[in-house]
Image (cartoon, rainbow, N blue to C red):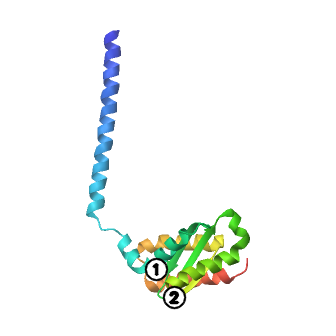
Amino acid sequence: MEKTNLVKVLLISLSSFMILVSGCNNKKEEGRSNKDSPSPMSYIENKQSPSHEAKAIVLSMPEITDAKAVNSEDQIFLAVKPKHLERFQLTSLKKKTKKKIEKKYPKMEVNVSTDQKIFTLLGELESKLDKKMDSKDIERELKKIQKKSTDEA
């Protein structure tokens, strides 16, 4: 009876050891494959650096919890999520945010929105940028978003 218990313990420990070792090998292989393939972010960084910087500026503000931003050649679209108590002062928050971004990019037209609909649309557009969208496609999508931001719900 002791031999069967010993065999069970040995089998369980051996199988758990094998699972542990195989899990470590997969992580090493994934790490190597990531180093070999080029990063898709390099395309986005070159074209979308103004929107990334604008997002960083806005996220440094204590009133903002989250932000989405996309830019074209001459426009920056920015959607922000304010903290709960800041919702009472949305117009002043928009002005303050817009002023900060315009100070950094004086030659670009800055559009700031606190609308949840625009926030989601810009988030979807940000995720589409991974597919190497053409600047004309980005411009077209931003025009659609701008039209929806001026529509009254």
Q: Earlier in the sequence, mark 2 or mark 1?
A: 1
Q: Residue at x 26, y 62 (%)?
A: 36
Q: Quadrant of the N terminus?
A: top left
Give me the C-alpha separation between circle 2 and circle 1.
10 Å
Q: Residue at x 31, y 47 (%)?
A: 26
Q: Residue at x 53, y 68 (%)?
A: 60
Q: Which residue is mark 2?
A: 108
Q: Position of residue 53 (x, y in %)?
A: 47, 75
Which is more toward the observer, 60 or 142?
Answer: 60
Q: Image height check: is 137 above or below 13?
A: below
Q: Position of residue 30 (x, y in %)?
A: 31, 54
Q: Quadrant of residue 98?
A: bottom right
Q: Quadrant of residue 68?
A: bottom right
Q: Position of residue 52 (x, y in %)?
A: 47, 74
Which is more toward the observer, 89 or 129?
Answer: 89
Q: Is residue 15 left or right of residue 86?
A: left
- Label drawn at residue 85: none
Q: Which residue is mark 1?
A: 50
Q: Quadrant of residue 21?
A: top left
Q: Residue at x 32, y 16 (%)?
A: 6
Q: Image height check: is 33 above or below 73?
A: above
Amino acid found under the numbered disc labelled 2: Met
Q: Is residue 37 left or right of residue 125?
A: left
Mark 1 secondary-structure assignment: helix
Q: Are marks 2 and 1 in contact (CB under 8 Å)?
A: yes
